[in-house]
Amino acid sequence: MLPDDTIIVRTYAQLSLYLRRFAEGQLGLLLLLGRPGTGKTHHAKQALGLGPACVDPESEPALYIEGHVQAFGLYQKLWQCRDQPVVLDDLDRLYADPNCVRLLKPLCNGQRQKTISWITNATREGGDVPDHFTTTSHVALIANEWRTLNANVRALEDRAIILLFDPPNAEVHQKAREWFKDVEVFTFIENWVGQVPALSLRHYEKGARLRQAGFVDWQESLKRMMRPDVRLLAIAQLRTDPGLHTEEARVRQFCKQTGCSRATYFRLRRRVYT
């Protein structure tokens, strides 16, 4: 369950505004949640002026860490990029490692100046890396969902500005219009925008790859990606079938195709179209 003070963000313009304010140092600790495929990572990097690869942390204006990282490796990067904004993408993996938790607790404590320490032989063997340092880095945490796993995670709820990025399909489609070049795939998805539970920017990329690879059934494959429940897919297809002129005809065809009941048809139809 999301914390009560979660801010729901529906548009990319709103998301960009919050991320710019974070980049300017005005938000301190930011927790950004949202389903995969909506561009959270891209917009966070864009707001911070990060390149797409972030190969050399010392040459970037901020530290961006995605996926798994060893705890001492995280400590080294925090030292190298001290006082710069820090973005940690994939919070669940980081909090699965007790040593990472030990670093993140002071890093996310809400104070302007934080002391981070690593008191082991690793720092003595790490050359110029000290066993402790102070930093004024402000932190953004990115995750697909919020799970209050333990007291360490719960402590973030009181300190962070929590955003849930949940754009409607029409907003995602409009964002894709800005960069997506495959007109055939774009037009196909446009016809399904109102019938997909949760549109993803990845649907556009996957559809383009399938079509450009020469798969003649790319449209059918893309429909299954966008509507993975075959019953929901059947309802959406029947709704646009020009040969079925009445709701009763669609119900009969649904029962024939799926083996499900009339009651199931109307229950799923309400889920999709209300």
Image (cartoon, grey):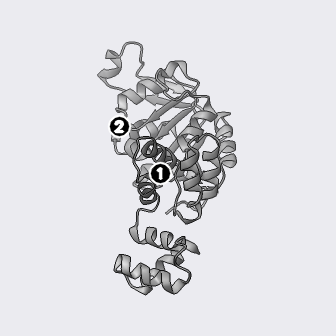
Determine whether the residue tagged by mark 1 lies in a helix, strand or loop: loop
Going by the image, does 233 lie left or right of 140? left
Going by the image, does 95 lie left or right of 52? left
Whole-percent x, y for residue 150 in the image: 40, 54
Whole-percent x, y for residue 174 in the image: 65, 50
For the question of whether residue 166 can be seen, the reply is no
Q: Nearer the viewer, residue 51 or 146?
A: 51
Q: Nearer the viewer, residue 234 or 81?
A: 234
- Disc 1: CA contacts within 10 A as few (<14), some (14-19) or many (>=20): some
Q: Looking at the image, which residue is at 37% across and 37% down?
A: 68
Quarter of the image where one finds residue 139: top right
Residue placed under numbered mark 1 in the picture: 144
**Position of the C terminus by quadrant:** bottom right
Q: Does the residue at mark 1 contact the one at mark 2 (Cβ under 8 Å)?
A: no
Determine whether the residue tagged by mark 2 lies in a helix, strand or loop: helix
The correct choice, above or below, for 230 with respect to 70 in the image is: below
Q: Nearer the viewer, residue 193 or 51?
A: 193
Which of the labelled discs sits on residue 99, or is there none?
2
